[in-house]
Amino acid sequence: MDDVAESAPSTKVTRSFLNVRNLRNFFPILLLLSLSVAFALSSDRFLTVNNGLIVLQQSTVLIVVSLAMTFVIVAGSIDLSVGSTVALSALATAATSGSLGAFALVPGVLVGICCGLLNGLLFAYGKIPSFIVTLGTLVIYRGVVLLFTKGAPVSISNADFLLVYTTRTFGVPNTVLIAIAALVLVTIIFNQTVFGREVRAVGGGERVALLSGIPVNSVKLGVFVLCGALCGLAGLLQASRTMAATAQLAEGLELDVIAAVVVGGTPLTGGIGKIRGTVLGVLIIAILSNGMNMIGMDPYLQNIIKGAVLIVAVFLTIDRSKILIIK
């Protein structure tokens, strides 16, 4: 009888733990479904194929940059320059689209890689904290965009470029297909390669990773180069969407990107994260913005709600038992 009495509280504790863990794992999905139902009841236009495609188009830049930020955050770092890198890459794409057409993708991505390489070198080998490095390059890259544009937009009118990046395939925008291809590639890198495992190891404990023989500095550099390459691709997607590169392009993007990654369950402490969580986070941010605009909500109130959703989502999704220090 005593054994039965002792096992009852233990069973309750176990069930309670499982319930908390299930809530943590499924909260992003529940939040996404709740938002979809709420906006569907508020507007007849929300649950339509056309609006679904609009949400996907609006999410392309955010998803590609958020995938990049997932690597950076899981590695225990941060990149505040992603918005400026996207703008600079979009400028390179727009400026070369007239002569290169669809191949303007190449200089755009190369510019992103160069930006990521500079960030990585200063951080990994210059031993400057990633927050400080990318805060500085955020201003530098945006300054370069302003210097070259003088505040005027650089338009895209090349027919080949427009044919490839602004049309649809089987009714789906090509930019969405490009973003999906990037998602598949990044998922493979994160989950199936040695580099992906090394990124998680460095974020989980840099000293332990170093003692285990992992080239920590090379991994850090690789993370920022990958981030720059994806930002370069995002610059192409943004330029093709707006048909121009402007000085204000992607301003504040880094805040939405960090919010999407964190809402998806990736803590800023590093070492933990999932690509599917980031995808859910992006969809939550995109649907929240789309739904609030559709029902005509005050833009200032929208910012308040976004901030509140971010805090609640982080509070409910982070597994504190796996994080020794909250910082």
Image (cartoon, rainbow, N blue to C red):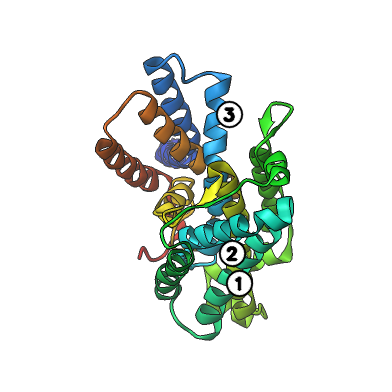
Residue 239 picture location, percent across and down: 57, 49
Task: Identify the image quadrant of residue 217.
Answer: bottom right
- Residue drawn at x 46%, y 17% is 45
Q: Tell me if residue 72 can be seen.
A: yes
- Circle nearer the N terminus (2, 3): 3
CA distance for labels 2 and 3: 27 Å
Q: Is residue 69 left or right of residue 132?
A: right
* Nearer the observer, 67 or 311: 67
Q: Kindly report which numbered mark, 1 or 2, lies closer to the viewer in this rendering.
A: 1
* Nearer the observer, 198 or 174: 174
- Circle nearer the N terminus (1, 2): 1
Residue 189 picture location, percent across and down: 70, 57
Q: Which residue is mark 3?
A: 53
* Nearer the observer, 102 or 261: 102
CA distance for labels 1 and 2: 7 Å
| Residue 198 vertical placement versus 272 (above, below) | below
Residue 114, numbered circle: 1
Q: Secondary structure at mark 2?
A: helix
Q: Are marks 2 and 3 in contact (CB under 8 Å)?
A: no
Q: Secondary structure at mark 3?
A: helix
- Circle nearer the N terminus (1, 3): 3
Give the residue type that dot 2 points to: Gly
Give the residue type that dot 1 points to: Cys
